[in-house]
Structure formats: structure tokens, C-alpha cells
Image: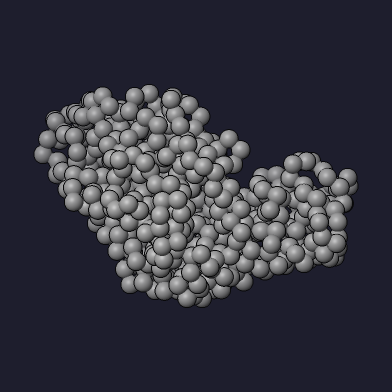
Amino acid sequence: MSIRHPLTDRVPGWLAEAVLYQVYPQSFADSDGDGIGDLPGLTGRLDHLAGLGVTALWLSPCFVSEFGDAGYDVADHLTVAPRYGTNADLVELVEQAARRGIRVLLDLVPGHTSHRHPWFRRSAQDPTDDRYVWSDRITAPVHEWIPNLGARGGFYRANFYPIQPALNFGYARPDPAEPWRSAVDDPGPLANRAALRAIMAHWFDLGVAGFRVDMAASLVKDDPGHVETARLWGELRDWLEADYPDRVLIAEWGDPARSVPAGLHADFFLHFTGRALRSLWDNGTGSQGSWADGKPCYFDPAGGGSMAEFLAAWQQADEAIAGRGLVALPTANHDFSRLACGPRTREQLAPAFAFLLSWPALPVIYYGDEIGMRFVPGLPEKEGSQFGTEARQGSRTPMQWDDTPGAGFSTAPAEALYLPLDPDPDRPTVAGQLADPHSLLRQVRALIRLRRDTPELGTGGSVRVLGAGYPLVYLRGESHLVVVNPRREPAVLPLPQARADAAVLLASGVRLAEGAVRAAGFSYGIFRI
């Protein structure tokens, strides 16, 4: 398998070269001792990100909210939630990050608001206001329709939780049985499109570099093939390229083959769409954590997985995107279990990072994964974290900076912390791993630096897979050989390109002999041949 599509000039150069880092703001760094992370705390930790080599920072929602869904229930898109600080604090973060070569992206939640948003409060009283999806009766799917307590009566359609009324971007198809369906060009849907532009422009003008777009596929309802939703994002992409050409939109869609041609700059392989991500680092048998399905994954100590599903999805996405954007590959996120979860411990994570940082995707590191923070099972529900059977709070625990009682995250007492710290007495910390030249953090730093200094390892270089079993072996740019063995057992691959005199750029447990690759368990190597 090989890449055939070089990136076009529609992809801003900084994004093509980016290493993106996701921060869950309430769990990263607490500056005022109230037990909840905040923007000044994050600003004070930017040197960690700069030292890591991160070039772009994405914050989960930090706007005014009642936090029934951890901030994804936005009540004011233009104001920072007081628990995180002020708008001035966000501007200071953007400016301080820029001094370190780091761009800041925010989270845009376009599909719904909080039921406390002024838009919804007005719509709940006024029968002529169609900014939200309203019906005079409950219709399918029944669980999404919530009785309205406002003067207009009826029912509103909600996304995920009853406190999140769905904004109305119209329906792609009319239905005589549901005459309340708006067309995509009715006043309410058009007003919501205009509001999206106004919100983005507000933050762009304050220096924000882009947005990660929550549930980007969900806007237009009953939209077979997402035709109208794609048209919406295509129009927004045209606006960006005309007025804000260096700003970007990264979709939470989970289908790059569809979303990037629709107009988004990048999209994630995600846990809820297909098996591409989970075939890499789900948690296999004996699994724990959110979304685990018990099937084998490639980055598993037992070595029972396969790269076939990932490579097929990658090939499909690459052909559909045709160089117009990027596939984003995350280590984890606030909804999906961390790399260190179930049978996979932090000692086994370096091969995963070697793959992430040498594959031509946009690498996205979830906070704490660079030190091997683990998914912590059995935690209490917090701010909507227990969604159905998915216990997502295990991926949202406080960042572990040092060995002080609050792990350097906060000076608050343990009972006041946003979520409990990992109780493992051997939990990893940034300070501890900085002091260890062989730590995961040190290896991740070295891998990011190598990617930065070696264009062939970035998003623009070609990739050709030479061996898709154990070990995984691929060529980048015809000159750089990457070997990854994430299983416990050693692996050998006969390979004509293997040369004993190849230059070792970064390796742990891999060596090249004439005509063969030999990889110890949990090993990786990057060579210039």
C-alpha cells in the first residue's frame, strides 16, 4: 500500500506539520486551588507542551455552561466559563502559546446548545422562533423528544441529553407526516448558519487558530449521504479561505473519506465509526474502559491483532481526500479509553507513539498519554461522564505533574478535586519522567523532534507498507524505514531493504541485519537506508 496523493495548497502549512495536543481544561492545571483546572493554570504549563514539541493545542469546551455534559452544553459561545477564568485569560493563553510556536484551537459545538442558552429560552416562549427543532407531538425517535415547559408548549428535539436542545439546520427531506420539518434555507436554519460564522469570527479575531467541530456530521437531519451537511461545511470552508485562510476546522465526524471532501480540513479516525481506530488500540479481551468491544487490536501485548482494517480504511480515506486535507489519528480522547488501559501498560506505549509520529496522519496526543497515564476504572460519575454503558470519567482524571499530594495539578484537598487522582502509588508524573532519560516522555519528545526534523516522516511524504504483520514495517519517502513491534514476543521479517549499515535515527530493541529486520518485544526503530 502506498500514498498517491500529495497535499494541496488547500491545507495550511502549519496544520500539515502540526503535532496536536488535546487538553481537557478542568483536569489539566488548577491555578487557584479550587480543584478544577483553569486557563491560567494551562498558561503556566505551556513550557511542558513546548518542550514536548507540540505545535497546536485543542481545548475541550471552555465556555459558559451548567456542565451537565462537561461543557458540551454551551450557554454562551462568546464567554469563558468563570470556573476557567475570563476572556482575557483566554487571550493571554493564545498570546503566550504563540510565543512558544503553539497555536490554540477551541471546541465548537454547532449541533445543540444548553437549555439555558438565551436562544433556547427565547425559542421556548415564541411559537414563531424556529432556531430549534420543534414538534407539537412526540415522533420517532421517541427518546429524543422532550416536553417543553415554556409558553409555546410542544416538544423539542434533543441531542444526547435532555438539557441539549438540537439547533435547527433543517431537514434534507420533507415528510407530509411531519409538517414541522424546516427546509435547510428556512429562516431558523439560515440564522443558525450565520451564528456559526459570527462565533468563529469572534474567536478568530482574538487569535484563535481554528476549531475542533463537535459531531460535525449531525447538523442537517434526515440527510442521506450527508449531502446537505456537506454543502453547509463546504460553504463555511469557502468563507474561511476567503476571509481567514490560515484558520482550520477539524471535524469530529469519524469518516475522513466523507468529511474532508465535504470541506473540513481534517477529521479523526474515531472509536464510534468503523474499526480503523479500535483495530489499532482498543483493549482486546479482558478489556476495561469506554467503547471497548473485546476484539483483538494490533497494539496489544498478546499480538493477536491485525493492521488490515486500519490500512484498508486509510487507503479509502486517502483516495477520497486526494490531498485536500488530513486524517487525524488520536492516542485517545475524553470519550475513548487511554492508550494505557486494561492489559496495555505504559511500558508498552513507546511503539504506539513511534507509529503515531511516523505515519502520515495528523498526530493528536491526549493530555497525559505522553507519560502513560492510565484509564482509571471505577470512578464516580461526573458531569455527564457516564453516558449509557460508557464510563468515560476514567479518561478524564487530573494531570499528573509531580509527587506532591495533588500531583501538581491542584493544592485543593483530595475531596475537592474535579475527579480523584489515579490511586496507583506508581502513577507516572512529568517530573519523574523528565528525570529518567529512558522514560516514555523522553522517547515521545525524541520522536516528535525527529518528525519535525525529517520531512519524510510527516504528512507530505509517501508511505509504502513492506510488512503488515508483526513487526509492522514501512518506508517513508523511499529513504526512511520504520519498524514497530507492539507485542510481547520478538518478531523477525525477511526484508531485502534491510541493511546492517543503515543509519539509526531512533531505535529501541530493533536492529537490521543484512536482509532481515529483528525486533524485540515492545520495540521500534526508525532508520535512514
Q: Quadrant of the C terminus?
A: top left
Residue 164: quadrant of the picture: bottom right
Q: Is residue 463 above or below residue 102?
A: above
**Residue 184 shows up from this direction:** no
Locate residue 156, reporting x and y percent: 78, 53
Q: Residue at x 82, y 64 (%)?
A: 125
Q: Quadrant of the N terminus?
A: top left
Q: Residue at x 74, y 45 (%)?
A: 144
**Residue 379 shows up from this direction:** yes
Locate residue 45, reporting x and y percent: 33, 63
As drawn, is 312 to the left or to the right of 520?
right
As drawn, is 515 to the left or to the right of 482?
left
Q: Is residue 154 above or below residue 279?
A: below
Relative to the observer, which residue lies in front, 499 or 23? 23
Q: Residue at x 54, y 48 (%)?
A: 382
As drawn, is 81 to the left or to the right of 45?
right
